[in-house]
Amino acid sequence: MGKYILDTCPVMLDTEYMSILSVQNLKVTFEDRVALDGVSFELEPGETLAIIGPNGSGKTVLLRALLRMVPYTGRIQWAGDVNLGYVPQKIDADRHLPVTFRNLLSAKAEVNSWSGEEISRAVRSVSLSDKILTTPVGHLSGGQFQRGLVALALLGNPSVLLLDEPTASVDVRGEEQIYELLHRLSEERRLTTILVSHDMSFVYQYADQVLCLNRERVCWGVPREVLTTETLNRLYNSPMRPYEHQHAEDH
Amino acid sequence: MLYTFEIYPLLLALTTAGLAGVVGSFALMKRMSLAGDVMSHVALPGLAIAVLFRVHPLWGGAAALLLGSLLIWQIERRTTVMSDSAIGVVFAAALALGALLLQTQEELIDALFGGFSTVTLSGLILGLLAIGLALIIMYRLRGHLLLGLFSPELAHSSGVRVDRVNLIYFLVFSLTILLGLQFLGAILVGALIIVPAAVGRQLTHTLGNFLIVSALAGMISVGLGFFLSAVYHLALGPTIVVVASVLFGLSLFKKKE
């Protein structure tokens, strides 16, 4: 449960240098609207990939395709039986429900028949206090809530973490804490991290690769090499210099 | 002074109310509280057709509810929120069709407002078995349902088969409506889904307590409703719903921290 046995050639799994994820010519269409077209990239184990792009550029759709939740053409190939953890951008339910992170963690553990020890390990790794665990989710601060979501994603010891704008509802200080936490986790556990972000300082500081998306691939590579002024202008269709795109979509 | 009421209907109604509290709590969290009203109205033409063909009305109601749950499941799969107009059309059309098909005023009043005629021992046992099965299903699905309503992507990545879980939930939901129809009728049965869960939400902070308090609020409403309707010779269904609404009013006095 929660694991993806994927369509890889078994011989390739033995090679140390194989990508953990290979995406080839990915296309996602909703009725007549093309959400993603011709997107290709590869990711090595332990790497951090930042996905950037304007609203409606297909960032969340790409994550949903990687989770195999939307129909697509092209190829998405995960290595071996990777175990994915997911941090959503927002929750669908009303946040002011009588539900705590203890309830949510227990729910995920029950679905997968994991022990309470697994829950404790996930909770410890993001330093969630008992008080936070037993407080209704609606009463938590943005940062506490986000750390709870990360703990939920880490439950089950995933090899890949997918995060959809994990700092969208967090203040600047909480934002830094979340990014530091993610960086520490990825170092300690050699986690492969795929993260949709608007925060260019994070992209420069922590991302090994960046994918610029505007329905199709605008750029791909090491941030300091590919994030030129010209690329960013082309991506956002407006004049913008590197480092200046902080929460551009909020304004 | 001793008031007597038949024990079989009371037992069946109390256990149904407990189930409705649990099912209603998830309906509230899934933001589909009003689906109870839609479903109960969908049952109406089924009841009417069964009466026409001299079959037990519950069979007609069950068939209509099965269709209704498949309909709602499909709508939910295709859109995130059921549109107001879709609810409005289904609601009104089902009510009108049911009213046309039911030939006498008395049949219509019974179908709309409920009121137990009789519950046989075999009917009681069958009902209790169905309620027991539904509670076991809800207990086993609670984690799947919680993750699914919280975030379908998170649920999917956690190993939950969201579509399948939702379908099972809608079937249990329909069963609850069917059981409640007998004593509350098509107009009021939706209240058994909505009101006790609203009380539970108001009074609790954790999922376990939410489910327990909602179930208890449903059972207290039914128990008191039976008692008051016997003492004051009131119609059973409306009395139960008024009691539940008073409980909700009282729950508003508790300030949420």
Image (cartoon, rainbow, N blue to C red):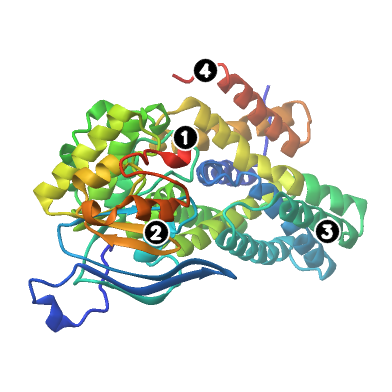
Compared with residue B209, is residue B136 higher up or lower down, i.e. above or below? Answer: below
The CA span between labels 1 and 4 is 15 Å
Can you give x and y, in whole percent of width and height, for residue B231 in the image? 73, 26
The 10 Å Cα crowd at callout 4, few under 14, some 14 to 19, many 20 or more, is few
- Assess whether mark 3 and mark 2 are in contact (beta carbons under 8 angstroms): no
Q: In whole angstroms, how far apart are the C-alphas of marks 1 and 3?
A: 36 Å
Seen from this angle, which residue lies furthest right? B104
Q: Is residue B115 left or right of residue B17?
A: right
What's the CA distance linking mark 4 and mark 3? Answer: 41 Å
Task: Say which residue label 2 marks.
Answer: A213
Q: Position of residue B23 (x, y in %)?
A: 53, 47
- Three-letter amino acid code of the residue under disc 1: Leu
- What subunit carries mark 2? A
Q: Is residue A137 above or below residue A44?
A: above
Q: In the image, what residue type sits under mark 4?
A: Lys
Task: Tell me which numbered mark, 2 or 1, is placed earlier along the sequence.
Answer: 1
Which kind of residue does numbered mark 3 sit on?
Gly
Q: Point out residue A117 in the picture as x, y percentages from the top left corner.
A: 15, 45
- Taking the spot 47% from the left edge, 37% from the top edge, the residue there is A250
SS class of the residue under badge 2? strand
> Which label sits on residue B115?
none
In front of the other: label 2 or label 4?
2
Label 1: chain letter: A
Please tell me the numbered disc located at residue B254: 4
Q: The residue marked by circle 3 belongs to what chain?
A: B
SS for dot 3: helix
Residue B98 numbered mark, or none = 3
The residue closer to the viewer here, B112 or A241, is A241
- Residues at discs 2 and 1 both on one chain: yes
Q: Answer yes or no: are tags 1 and 3 on the same subunit.
A: no
Q: Which residue is mark 1?
A: A97
